[in-house]
Image (spheres, rainbow, N blue to C red):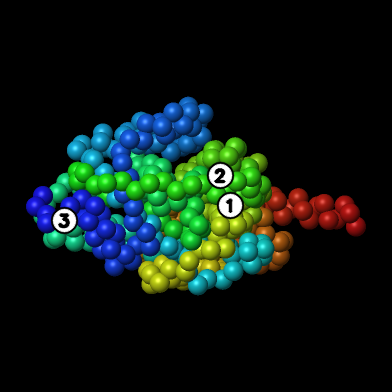
Amino acid sequence: MDSNFDNRELVERIKGWGRELGFDAVGIAGIDLAEAEPGLKAWLDAGYHGEMDYMARHGSKRARPAELVPGTLSVISVRMNYKTEAAEAELALGDAKRAYISRYALGRDYHKVLRNRLQQLADRMQAEIGEFGYRAFTDSAPVLEVEIAKRAGLGWRGKHTLLLNREAGSTFFLGEIYTDLPLPHDAPISEHCGNCTACIDACPTRAIVAPYQVDARRCISYLTIELKEAIPEDLRPLIGNRVYGCDDCQLCCPWNRFAQLSPEPDFAVRNGLDDVTLVELFAWTERQFEDRLAGSAIRRIGYERWLRNIAVGLGNAPTTRETIAALNSRRDHASALVREHVQWALSQHQRREQQEQQQQ
């Protein structure tokens, strides 16, 4: 590396270049994450990672940046707001006929957006200071991104385990550049959750089993995105109309009153996904799913799990001719996974109708 900047001046330049590229904050963290390692091990030992085998496979490497990328001396941590103009989340959640999709997934896949910007930031740095070693990550490798962002001064860990920031709540994405540059580190900021337990109390499936500890096996985001098999029957009624992800622990958080709207056009709502019925989405063909969700994070779960999730939502929806007709249209679907969830949904409606008749 050949540079006319000293390291502190370089950090300020990096932060400025990051803001020019659309990042809402940039911080620098060290690589000593030893304090986080026991908690990670205990979480894995408890089996809270569920079917996410890669979490256990990578093990302690997540807490050891220099093992993941040899030569790493510093981590550049960035955040980018994703909140956009969309239909009121609470209104969608309050209408059981509508499909609720996590607000972060309404636009373009954030992996692509952040990865591209991180590469641009690295390119800008190389243009200014010459060649240096680095690797960029966006939720794409064994990285303790919240822990790193916390140490970089971008926020503090909330009791729901997400990063919180006084000026932006938690509605943002994180990304990292592991680098061999010996950059001075930013100082962590103080925590501001206090005695609040709003996120713990709001979780529909009680997945936040203790402050700062989530059992992914009960988390709706895990159940609708990561889980490849059947959703446990006892959890299906609790999922409600959430067909991709869940925002309940964020929607109730007092700090999200300060969430900032993102000017990033890639995060704008696509395909009207902020205000659509379950019946409408269930009618999509596989071709429509692939075409309409091209470039979306949702597409990675595949059409089969998409139908699985919506079938659960329809099972929790009001019993109407439209709902029953939609479910019957898929009861002989080629996928056993889809058929199982459709049958469960139909049985839910049959049970409710029988209960109503008994009460008359």
Q: Earlier in the sequence, mark 2 or mark 1?
A: 2
* Residue at 51% across, 29% down: 46
Q: Image quarter for residue 63? A: top left
Question: Are the residues tagged 1 and 3 within 8 Å (C-beta)?
Answer: no
Image quadrant holding the C terminus, namely: bottom right
Residue holding disc 3: 5
For mark 2, give the secondary structure: loop
The answer to whether one can see residue 339 in this image is no
Q: Residues within 10 Å of mark 3 (few under 14, many from 20)?
A: few
- The residue under label 2 is which amino acid type? Lys
* Relative to 209, 21 lies left or right: left
Residue holding disc 1: 249
Q: Residues within 10 Å of mark 1 (few under 14, many from 20)?
A: many
Give the answer, above or below, for where 201 lies relative to 94.
above
* Residue at 40% across, 72% down: 263
Label drawn at residue 76: none
- The residue under label 3 is which amino acid type? Phe
Question: Are the residues tagged 2 and 1 within 8 Å (C-beta)?
Answer: no
User: Which residue extends farthest left?
Assistant: 2
For mark 3, give the secondary structure: loop
* Residue at 33% across, 35% down: 32
Q: Earlier in the sequence, mark 1 or mark 3?
A: 3
Q: Position of residue 23 (x, y in %)?
A: 34, 62
Real-space Cα distance between discs 2 and 3?
40 Å
Residue holding disc 2: 159
Real-space Cα distance between discs 1 and 3?
43 Å
Nearer to us in this view, 271 or 84: 84
